[in-house]
């Protein structure tokens, strides 16, 4: 009880999203990197004992409980700090609008990128199926950004997650130039202190 | 205001999960089927105007608001009825445990099945990548079922969703026989009135 929380991460992975939210909230938190190939943590622990699913992020709460799903970790971080900027209160419909974005990103974007990260996955299918699908999803986001941020003037949970997806798009040289709102949005996010700090902390 | 809610569904699709929860809660609800190929609803509406993403489920709330993400619709249904059997209250860690299961199913199982439903997807990759991945995910679930239901004695949101995934596994003739807990679990769910009713309503 009353210990700091701890985030297991891998450099540039989707665990960057909860790190951004942790920094946004200025929460005290310990960070430890994980080698996802050898399934060893930086301090030499067997990561599969921490998360049998073998993936990051993993958040250890101040009570020592373990969370292993990105979308739920984001929700937990906003709930536990009662931060209604990142996630509007339960009684407002905007609560679900924010969660819909988080869920869209985790299922439709993040999981689509999974194929690109998979070296076994046939190159031709990446080009004929995966990349057009990712483009279609980004096109949807592009036409639905409400303002400076996804939901309008306010930075909310899915902005942290979408930032990571846009970084991945650039990593895989996916052409985003036709999504002009997204380009502007990404550049705006790059200036946000919590994001600058998070990139610096991961050496990105 | 104060109208019934409405669920847009497609027979046997993942929209079966919110239908099960709606029946579990005995909520008044209108159901309308959608042809996902022609993007027309049963009454001849253009489904893309209802959900530009083009997929089901879509829930129209009694206030006329639209929700389009399965995991969020499930959470909304439990929240709005204040049903703490399906989803424990926010202050309990079990709240997040339930949401972790929902998120695991939507990202790791549901999205993996996406490749099997995609006729463009290379058959060889389905057999060498997709099915082993689905087997791995089911093996994880198999060793983590806590009781009659995923979380123990109590039927919670992810049970409805996992039931649909198990039906899909059978549809694609994925061999679940080594996952003995899952087989028992599936047979238990088949006896649950909300599930029997839902299958009957969709003519399954």
Image (tube, coloured by chain):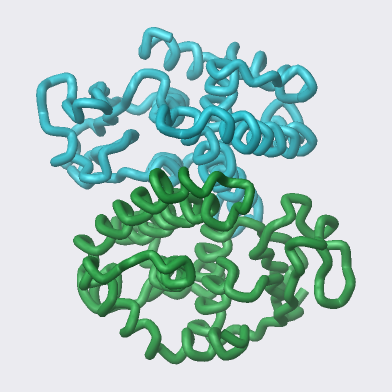
Chain colours: A cyan, B green
* Residue B30 or residue A37, whichever sits in front: A37
Residue A81 in view: yes
* Residue A178 or residue A133, whichever sits in front: A133
Instruction: In the displayed orientation, state which residue is furthest to the front.
Output: B124
* Residue A63 or residue B145, whichever sits in front: B145
Image quarter in which the C terminus of chain A is found:
top left
Looking at the picture, how far across and down is residue B168, in whole percent?
47, 68
Residue A21 in view: no
Residue at 31% in and 59% down: B138
Looking at the picture, how far across and down is residue B73, in whole percent?
58, 63
| In the depicted structure, whether residue B50 falls above or below residue B120 | below
Q: Is residue A41 left or right of residue B156?
A: left
Q: Is residue B185 left or right of residue B104?
A: left
* Residue A113 or residue A128, whichever sits in front: A128
Looking at the picture, how far across and down is residue B177, in whole percent?
26, 71
Q: Quadrant of residue A191?
A: top right
Residue at 55% in and 43% down: A102
Image quarter in which the N terminus of chain A is found:
top left
Residue at 27% in and 68% down: B151
Looking at the picture, how far across and down is residue B79, in whole percent?
51, 67
């Amino acid at each position: 009880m009353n210990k700091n929380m701890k985030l297991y991460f891998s450099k540039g992975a989707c665990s960057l999203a909860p790190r951004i939210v942790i920094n946004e909230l200025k929460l005290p938190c310990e960070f430890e990197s994980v080698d996802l190939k050898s399934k060893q943590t930086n301090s030499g622990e067997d990561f599969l004992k921490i998360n049998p699913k073998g993936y990051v992020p993993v958040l250890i709460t101040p009570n020592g409980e373990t969370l292993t799903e990105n979308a739920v970790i984001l929700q937990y971080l906003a709930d536990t700090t009662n931060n209604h900027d990142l996630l509007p209160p339960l009684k407002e419909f905007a609560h679900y609008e924010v969660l819909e974005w988080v869920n869209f990103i985790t299922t439709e974007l993040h999981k689509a990128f999974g194929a690109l990260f998979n070296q076994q996955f046939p190159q031709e299918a990446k080009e004929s199926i995966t990349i057009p699908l990712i483009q279609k999803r980004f096109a949807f986001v592009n036409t639905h950004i409400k303002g400076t941020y996804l939901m309008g003037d306010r930075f909310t949970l899915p902005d942290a997650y979408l930032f990571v997806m846009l970084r991945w798009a650039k990593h895989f040289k996916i052409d985003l130039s036709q999504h002009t709102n997204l380009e502007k949005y990404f550049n705006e996010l790059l200036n946000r202190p919590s994001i600058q700090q998070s990139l610096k902390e991961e050496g990105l």
